């Protein structure tokens, strides 16, 4: 397969990236590889609202194949078949994400740029293909969601003291609050005394979680 480009955003490490696309409205841009930087590749895409991104789990370490994995939604303690999950550890390291088109810039120094929101990809992730989302066929309201709909994912209440909130650029605050509310901790960890850290842009955000509340304790510039 050819890599057609890569994504650029403020997710600088895997830890803390949303577990599914569409959960956090972070803005990303897709930069095409040189051979695909023809504005015609996006002709007609302005009439769509969403696209599918097909991409590579490029930051995964090589691990032996396992037919079962431990989904975070089940607390990380119950094993399910790999093909019944969206685990990043798969026979082929391919991801699929539905994202919203925010704008298309056809003529920039970096070629035609597709701006999207809701991506669950780390900065620099290789993009393998882009396909339009078709609501008449891609949306199946009566479809069953398996264990993903049987077990509710609880979001957290986020508390950031005013003196720490001031350290976050105004335009990044809402995205960071959304990101933290999704509970970036590993599913099997629930220690109220443990201090976790998630990196977003050039900030390392330290926090604790207790009784459904995430409290930011420190923000360190990188």
Image (cartoon, rainbow, N blue to C red):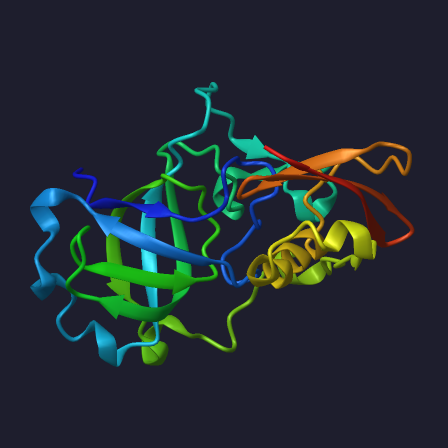
The residue sitting at 49% across, 38% down in the picture is 12
Q: Is residue 85 above or below residue 195?
A: below
Residue 119 locus on image (x, y percent): 45, 55
The quadrant of the picture occupied by the N terminus is: top left
Q: Is residue 121 above or below residue 152?
A: above
Q: How many marks?
A: 0
Left or right, 84 with respect to 129, comes to right
Left or right, 26 with respect to 103, comes to right
User: Based on the displayed image, in which of its 4 quarters is residue 153 positioned?
Assistant: bottom right
The answer to whether residue 60 is visible is yes
The residue sitting at 56% across, 33% down in the picture is 68
The answer to whether residue 160 is visible is no
Residue 47 locus on image (x, y percent): 24, 80
Residue 193 locus on image (x, y percent): 91, 33
The residue sitting at 90% across, 38% down in the picture is 192
Q: Is residue 115 above or below residue 37?
A: below
Residue situated in front as seen by the camera: 49 or 38: 38
């Amino acid at each position: 397969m050819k890599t057609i480009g890569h994504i650029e955003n403020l997710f600088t490490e895997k830890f803390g990236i949303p577990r599914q696309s569409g959960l956090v409205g972070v803005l990303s841009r897709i930069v095409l590889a040189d051979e695909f930087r023809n504005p015609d590749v996006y002709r007609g895409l302005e009439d769509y609202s969403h696209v599918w991104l097909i991409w590579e789990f490029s930051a995964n370490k090589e691990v032996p194949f396992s037919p079962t994995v431990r989904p975070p939604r089940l607390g990380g303690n119950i094993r399910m078949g790999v093909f019944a999950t969206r685990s990043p550890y798969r026979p082929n390291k391919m991801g699929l994400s539905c994202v919203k088109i925010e704008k298309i810039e056809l003529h920039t120094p970096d070629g035609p740029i597709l701006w999207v929101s809701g991506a669950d990809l780390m900065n620099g992730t290789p993009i393998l293909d882009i396909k339009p989302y078709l609501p008449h066929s891609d949306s199946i309201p009566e479809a069953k969601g398996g264990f993903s709909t049987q077990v509710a994912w609880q979001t957290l209440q986020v508390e950031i003291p005013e003196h720490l909130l001031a350290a976050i650029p105004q335009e990044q605050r809402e995205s960071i609050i959304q990101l933290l509310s999704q509970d970036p901790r590993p599913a099997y960890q629930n220690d109220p005394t443990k201090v976790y850290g998630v990196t977003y842009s050039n900030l390392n955000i330290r926090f604790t979680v207790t009784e459904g509340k995430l409290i930011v304790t420190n923000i360190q510039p990188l």
